Image: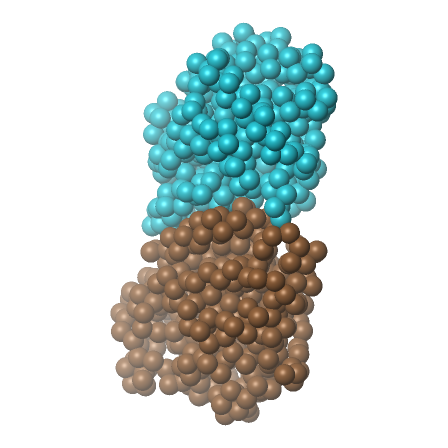
Chain colours: A cyan, B brown
Amino acid sequence: VVSSSLETITVRTPSLSYQVHIGSDLLESIGSRVDALVQGGLSSGKQRAFVVSSPEILAFWGQKLVHSFPSATVTLAVPSGEQGKRMSTVEKLLEELAELGADRDSVLVAFGGGVVGDMTGFLAACYMRGIRYVQVPTTLLAQVDSSVGGKTGVNLAAGKNLAGAFHHPLAVYADVSTLKTLPPAELRAGLQEAVKAGIIRDPELFALLERERDRVLSCDQAALIDVVARSVRVKADVVNADERESGVRMILNLGHTLGHAIEAATEYKQLLHGEAIAWGMLAAVAIAKRRNMVTVAEHDRIEQIIKSFGPLKRFHADPAQLVSLTAKDKKNRSGNRSFILPRGIGDAVVVKDVTVDELTFTAQRMMAMVAREGA
Amino acid sequence: VVSSSLETITVRTPSLSYQVHIGSDLLESIGSRVDALVQGGLSSGKQRAFVVSSPEILAFWGQKLVHSFPSATVTLAVPSGEQGKRMSTVEKLLEELAELGADRDSVLVAFGGGVVGDMTGFLAACYMRGIRYVQVPTTLLAQVDSSVGGKTGVNLAAGKNLAGAFHHPLAVYADVSTLKTLPPAELRAGLQEAVKAGIIRDPELFALLERERDRVLSCDQAALIDVVARSVRVKADVVNADERESGVRMILNLGHTLGHAIEAATEYKQLLHGEAIAWGMLAAVAIAKRRNMVTVAEHDRIEQIIKSFGPLKRFHADPAQLVSLTAKDKKNRSGNRSFILPRGIGDAVVVKDVTVDELTFTAQRMMAMVAREGA
């Protein structure tokens, strides 16, 4: 099988650079690509590639990936789902790596969605104080967002992703072919992060998503490559400018302040991440409209595209609880509450003066919309 | 109280620089020193200094440290001892920090021995993907070695320090006054790491330890400042040259390959770290003598000084088991076994050709010495 087209985007950080490859039928060549990246090759010395993946992804795509490696790989299975994304799972995997004889030259392969990627990245960050890994994201959410940027980690009882590390992969391989086995709801949820990328930085991506909605939803490979590549470029541009999220990188969190609050309020069980972010973006754009940072037309266009990748799922939460949960956001510093607001389509800013009243207004409005339109 | 003398050593890494201050009666000024280091001061915004310490150290020295801060601090207690240095303890502390409202501007203060320092550093590395911390080491081992260099982490069932991160402190404050409450066995064990520093890089430190043995053992403050400062300078020089232990930094592990094996074989319960390292150094210098890398006179001088900071504690282990445990050393890459050997006094090298026969010889010789001379 020949890859139809391959897009390559370079992420440049002060500490290192790496490439994100986006294409279809990529799995078949990932092993040899990783082998070429690793000095001396993977087959020198003892076994050194460890694939970390979920049982579902291994069942669908495991053979293709594993056979692409020139030498034997070891496979570690992790539970899928946010519930398993905990320190205890990481500790178990660390023990397994040690028992299997992984050393500082070993390379981990994160093969799965965001949970697998975040956890495997953190595993690589912690094992022997840091070994190499590559990301092979198999969900749209992971391809457009979480596999790029070096953020790794796990959840605490106190909040999502509160423990972790910045640890960049050697490379990212996003094969849109794997999206064929993705549940349609996850495809739609992942598209919300692509919508986010369009809103904050790329009006052409936004227009592409409006224009190609049906092709994208039917898993057209060329359309998906375009969407993923443009989304990754947005993320890479922002990360390149701000590796550690001290400034501009925070705009990637559009919709996430309330989105995270929704996920926390529903205990990460009722909504997919992208679905929570969709509701959060609707709330953010409502504040932006109220502040005249977006026109009514822009507001409606944003609301329309978010809903077009719905149906947005219903959930139960108390607006006041959502507001108080935003106080725990990691982006807050020294008690200041940060919030990301769109400024038209293709631009967004970090503001620190969103009041509790504004948050309450938008949370109430959002919950009314949930009651009225949630599926 | 006026500090008698204050030595300051700068650690320079590619990523950042920080200072190690060594003196007596330092605790009283640490809070205001940290406050001055943190942009805007600790008292701006909400509470942001979190002291992590053991119950013992808090009982002896907690008041002095806590009162040195211009604003209130929060204290988190951790169990002392290697057994508690685990992921589960770190996770518990992460949850506590979150509950207490620590944010990205918070500063942790690692106040205790190596276990507290390693765990607090890792806690700081992981909390919200990295916050700042300072080291206030209160054992000689932590002052001369573990508080400097940015290595943080916890133990796995499979081995010591197998999980962790490189995360440098903002500053290190080593107050030798705190050594007055250190159990004498821990003082002697810590001196073995100072001996190590002398062997690998500083013949004057080696001679100082020979000459000032009695003053040092009686906790003479000026002598201790000299020993700690010279030892830290060795460590800083080596770390400056090699932040991530890809090359020269490995010489800091003289005595550690077998030392770690001894600790693993005795389940970290029978020996202090420095005591295990002392036995490991005796084994390494025996290999070096057999290879003619040290003269008989140098060998005897090294053996003599190590024993002079004894008595070295007895332990039970099978030589063959010790040899097989060295195969798990983190320094091994792609199956190659690395070993550090002295080359005279004040010099050491990393070798990769130590054979199983040599290891077996030296492990057997060492166990015979344990049986004959162990206390």
Tell me if I can see residue B217 in this picture. Answer: yes
**B358 vs B96: above or below:** below
- Front-most of residues A50 and B287: A50
Where's residue A236, x and y in %? Answer: 64, 32
Q: Is residue A56 left or right of residue A284?
A: left
Name the residue at 48% across, 13% down. Answer: A372
Q: Is residue B8 left or right of residue B336?
A: right
Q: Is residue A145 left or right of residue A207?
A: left
Q: Which corner quadrant holds the C terminus of chain B?
A: bottom left
Q: Is residue B346 left or right of residue A318?
A: right
Name the residue at 50% across, 21% down. Answer: A367
- Front-most of residues B291 and B281: B281
Where's residue B87, x and y in %? Answer: 40, 53
**B290 vs A22: above or below:** below
**A164 vs A68: above or below:** below
Tell me if I can see residue B165 in this picture. Answer: no
Name the residue at 47% across, 38% down. Answer: A160
Where's residue B156, x and y in %? Answer: 37, 55
For this orientation, the residue located farthest to the front is A357
Q: How many marks?
A: 0
- Front-most of residues B328 and B80: B80
Where's residue A256, x and y in %? Answer: 56, 31
Name the residue at 48% across, 18% down. Answer: A370
**A320 vs B78: above or below:** above
- Front-most of residues B189 and A247: A247
Q: Which corner quadrant holds the N terminus of chain B?
A: bottom right
